[in-house]
Image (cartoon, rainbow, N blue to C red):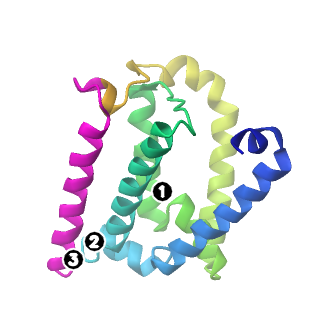
Amino acid sequence: MLTQIHTRKWLQYGLGLVFGFAFGFLLQKGRVCHYDVILRQLLLEDFTVLKVMLSAIVTGMIGVYALRAAGWVTLHKKAGSLGTSIPGPLIFGIGFALLGYCPGTAVGAVGHGALDALIGGVLGIMIGAGLYAAAYPKLKQRVLNLGSFGDKTLIDVLPVRNPWLVILPVAAIIALVLLCLERMGL
């Protein structure tokens, strides 16, 4: 089945569209596409966004490694560096704080009619992506490769052979954090 997906572009695009709509629908249902919810998260008053993100991390972590264990997928890790891990999140954080949306929630907010997300978010994403693409050759040469740490994951760095020895405790810690947030009414 996966081979059929890899060999048929129309199927890849169709699945991307279906999963994109599903993702947007779930973001809407989780209320994380609303500016006021995101603003209250940034003010540490409402932890809905954090709860959705932590739930997604646990689901993705378990799902990817379960699919890998079943032999359905292989991991294609990308090399990281300080040159990508510091400026990228800083730019993302500045945009997130100024606009009140991340790329996913901006597109979701456009879906429910938020013009600020359309003009500031989607237009900003397109302009930023264009500027990055134009500057990429120079950035790669001067910034992006600084402090390279290879394609290591947390599981690769820790002295464990079985990835589940990392995944299960991390999942348990995240579940505990989610439980504490719920009990505290946040």
**Residue type, mark 2 in image:** Leu
Q: Nearer the viewer, residue 70 or 88?
A: 70
- The circle drawn on residue 182 is 3
**Residue type, mark 1 in image:** Gly
What whole-number distance in Å separates the C-alpha atoms at marks 1 and 2?
A: 16 Å
The reply, left or right, for residue 68 in relation to residue 114 is left
Q: Magenta region's main secondary structure?
A: helix
- The circle drawn on residue 43 is 2
Which residues are the magenta region?
A: 157-186
Place residue 53 in its image quadrant: bottom left
Mark 1 closeness class: few <14, some 14–19, many ≥20 residues within 10 Å? some
The reply, left or right, for residue 166 in relation to residue 143 is left
How far from the left and from the top, in percent, is residue 173? 19, 54
Which-is-in-front pick, marks 3 and 2? 3
State the residue at coordinates (15%, 70%): 180
> Which corner quadrant holds the C terminus?
bottom left
State the residue at coordinates (19%, 82%): 185
Under tag 2, what secondary structure? loop
Earlier residue among tags 1 and 2: 2
- The circle drawn on residue 133 is none
User: Relative to 139, is 108 above or below?
Assistant: below
Q: Nearer the viewer, residue 23 or 93?
A: 23
How far from the left and from the top, in percent, is residue 89? 41, 44
The reply, left or right, for residue 177 in relation to residue 40 is left
State the residue at coordinates (49%, 38%): 68
What whole-number distance in Å separates the C-alpha atoms at marks 3 and 1?
A: 28 Å
Residue under pointer 1: 95
Under tag 3, what secondary structure? helix
User: Relative to 35, is 97 above or below?
Assistant: above
